[in-house]
């Protein structure tokens, strides 16, 4: 017996593709992939088809999750800059507002300076404004957060130097938090040669030297989120492949191997994947327990055979540690021995913590 017992991961950045693209993933397959990876809660992004920029779309998506999710969840509101009254109306139910300042998958964009400023001004919280922002857009969003006194969360920081810019803004009093993805920590742009479009995502992978700098500067990072962005193999093999890679089932085992190698402490790992995601989004911890079996030691991740509907992983061949044996949510075993024991709809909306102060 060499079992590790954790509360599991709270993944603050996933794309479960429902509604709109259920050939890639849906709420049930995505939350099942979450449990398979020891992820007990997911925060789902609004770049669906249609995008979640209206109250009735938000309500419909909430109803979908309420009937289909097997892990706990929170949903982001989105905005295309119009109908700000609707964006404001979604705020009490949403974990945060997601804005897209740069090019990526889907049609949602927030590039027009005036409406972007109006959106920053209008957002009432309590969740943060999370942004897809690369290089210059990071500066733009930091300025807006300063001007409108908003809590800004920078998603998937594109380059380790941006961690220094974010930290400098934080030192100057801007309320800013940030996340790094497992692919920016465990893959480099060398993977693109090996995997082609399967290693393409936004923001793109960095050089091996910059990847190492992400590790050196990990103390400046609030949380690790997967940016689980499944696309089918066929879509990835097409002429103009969509950016994005899955990550729900591989992140904890990759991080546990890194802990085993002494690259971070177990305490810091738990902060990055569990405590801090809850704090950043002001959420209460669900009652959860994840048991991982470490007895087989290190192993290499497979290329396929995953529960995510897309079925593949860009991390095939990477060293990992720990296999999820069981997941318990609110006292009920929902996942055991690779099998789902929960019924669709047993996942709950993550509740707000009593205190909203960002420590
Ligand atoms: C994401 C997707 O496919 O929805 N793709 C990606 O490359 N990360 C969108 C996003 O988070 O940028
Ligand atoms: Zn994303």
Image: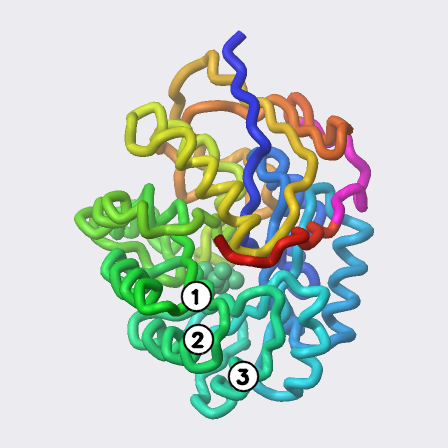
Q: Which residue is mark 2?
A: 145
State which quadrant residue 244 falls in: bottom left
The earlier-in-sequence mark between 2 and 1 is 2
Colour scheme in the image?
A: rainbow
Horizontal side, residue 292 vs residue 263: left or right: right
Please tell me whether residue 276 is drawn above or below residue 177 in the rendered image: above
Residue 22 or 339: which is nearer the viewer?
Answer: 339
In the rendered structure, the answer to whether residue 340 lies left or right of residue 108 reads right
Query: Counting other residues with Cα less than 10 Å from the Cα at mark 3, is it few (<14), some (14-19), or many (20 or more)?
Result: some
How far across and how far down the image is residue 257, in percent? 37, 27
In this view, which residue lies farthest toward the left? 209
The disc label shown at residue 175, or none: 1
Q: Which residues are magenta?
A: 339-348
- Could you tell me residue 264's position as x and y percent? 33, 33
Mark 3 secondary-structure assignment: helix
- The residue at 61%/28% (across/down) is 290
The residue at which mark 3 appears reads as 121
What is the crowding at mark 1: few (fewer than 14 residues within 10 Å), some, or many (at least 20)?
some
Q: Is residue 236 left or right of residue 85?
A: left
Give the CA distance from mark 2 to mark 1.
Answer: 7 Å
Camera sees residue 191 = yes
**Mark 3 vs 2, N-terminal side:** 3
Q: CA distance from mark 3 to mark 2?
A: 9 Å
Please identify the quadrant where the N terminus is shown: top right
Please say if 102 is above or below 338.
below
Instruction: Please say if the residues under marks 2 and 1 sit with CB atoms less than 8 Å apart.
Output: yes
Disc number at residue 312?
Answer: none
Q: CA distance from mark 3 to mark 1?
A: 15 Å
Q: Residue 11, position in %: x, y?
A: 54, 47
What is the residue that sits farthest to the top in this orientation? 1
């Amino acid at each position: 017996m060499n079992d590790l017992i954790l509360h599991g991961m709270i993944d603050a950045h996933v794309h479960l593709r429902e509604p709109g693209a259920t050939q890639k993933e849906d709420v049930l397959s995505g939350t099942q992939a979450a449990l398979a990876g020891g992820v007990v809660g997911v925060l789902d992004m609004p770049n669906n088809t249609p995008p979640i920029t209206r109250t009735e779309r938000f309500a419909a998506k909430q109803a979908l999750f309420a009937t289909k999710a097997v892990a706990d969840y929170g949903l982001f509101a989105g905005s295309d800059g119009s109908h700000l009254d609707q964006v404001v109306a979604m705020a009490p139910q949403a974990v945060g507002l997601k804005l897209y300042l740069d090019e990526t998958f889907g049609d949602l964009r927030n590039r027009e300076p005036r409406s972007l400023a109006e959106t920053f001004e209008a957002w009432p919280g309590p969740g943060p404004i999370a942004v897809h922002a690369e290089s210059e857009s990071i500066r733009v969003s930091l300025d807006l957060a300063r001007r409108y006194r908003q809590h800004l969360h920078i998603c998937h920081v594109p380059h380790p130097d941006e961690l220094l810019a974010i930290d400098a803004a934080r030192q100057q009093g801007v309320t800013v938090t940030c996340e790094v993805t497992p692919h920016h920590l465990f893959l480099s742009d060398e993977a693109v040669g090996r995997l082609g479009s399967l290693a393409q995502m936004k923001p793109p992978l960095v050089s091996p030297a910059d990847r190492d700098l992400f590790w050196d500067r990990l103390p400046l990072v609030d949380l690790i989120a997967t940016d689980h962005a499944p696309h089918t193999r066929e879509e990835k093999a097409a002429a103009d492949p969509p950016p994005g890679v899955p990550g729900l089932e591989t992140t904890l085992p990759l991080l546990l191997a890194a802990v085993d190698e002494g690259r971070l402490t177990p305490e810091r790992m738990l902060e990055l994947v569990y405590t801090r995601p809850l704090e950043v989004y002001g959420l209460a911890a669900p009652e959860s327990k994840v048991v991982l079996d470490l007895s087989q030691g290190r192993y290499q991740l497979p290329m396929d055979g995953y529960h995510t509907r897309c079925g593949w992983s860009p991390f095939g061949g990477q060293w990992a540690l720990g296999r999820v044996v069981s997941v318990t949510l609110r006292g009920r075993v929902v996942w055991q021995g690779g099998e789902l024991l929960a019924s669709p709809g047993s996942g709950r909306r993550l509740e707000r913590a009593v205190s909203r102060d960002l420590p």
